[in-house]
Amino acid sequence: MISEKEDNISKFYNLIDATPKRQYWEHEYDIVDLSWQKRRDERGQILKSIFIVTCSLDCKAILWRIDKEAPEQIYDHGDALTCVSFHPVLENIFVTGSLDQSIRIWSMDQSDSCLDEV
């Protein structure tokens, strides 16, 4: 389970004893949304997720590998983000929505610019 607090920290909890297993500290402002990557095998069966992406009012989407505390990648959006979601099929693609009324499509493989903007 992941919790988001107003202290700009996401905490990944062990559900058995309810203790934080990992904490993610990189955002400068409140985290407003997160999304789990859905990985699938060749038959379409869901595999264990290893990435989450968080978004914040600090204009950043941050990709985290759940077994590391340091961010995997930081994506700058330009305005405060309000939502983020991984693509349901293409596991390396996610989208962000922003207060500037734009939706950006990102690839985990490319952090310097978005793939597209609507």
Image: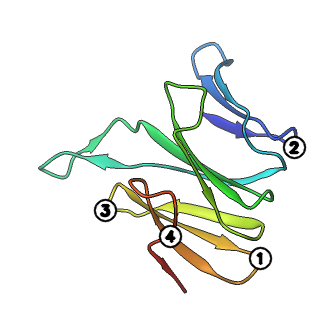
Amino acid type for the residue under numbered disc 1: Leu
> Which residue was labeled with disc 3?
89
Check disc 3 and report its element: helix, strand or loop.
loop
> Which residue was labeled with disc 2?
6
Q: CA distance from mark 4 to mark 3?
A: 18 Å
Q: From the image, which quarter does the N terminus lie in? A: top right
Q: Which-is-in-front pick, marks 4 and 2?
A: 4
Depth check: 89 or 68 in front? 68
Q: CA distance from mark 4 to mark 2?
A: 27 Å
Q: CA distance from mark 3 to mark 1?
A: 26 Å
> Which residue was labeled with disc 1?
99
Check disc 1 and report its element: helix, strand or loop.
loop
Depth check: 72 or 90 in front? 72
Pointer 1 or 4: first along the chain: 1
Pointer 3 or 2: first along the chain: 2
Figure colour scheme: rainbow
Pointer 4 or 2: first along the chain: 2
Amino acid type for the residue under numbered disc 3: Val
- Residue 46 location, quadrant: top left
Query: Going by the picture, which residue comes out furthest to the left?
Result: 43
Q: Which-is-in-front pick, marks 1 and 4?
A: 4
Crowd around label 1: few <14 · some 14–19 · many ≥20 (10 Å)? some
Crowd around label 4: few <14 · some 14–19 · many ≥20 (10 Å)? some
Query: Going by the picture, which residue comes out furthest to the top?
Result: 17
- Residue 110 location, quadrant: bottom left
Q: Which-is-in-front pick, marks 1 and 2?
A: 1
Check disc 2 and report its element: helix, strand or loop.
loop
Amino acid type for the residue under numbered disc 4: Cys
Q: Which-is-in-front pick, marks 3 and 1?
A: 1
Mark number displayed over residue 114: 4
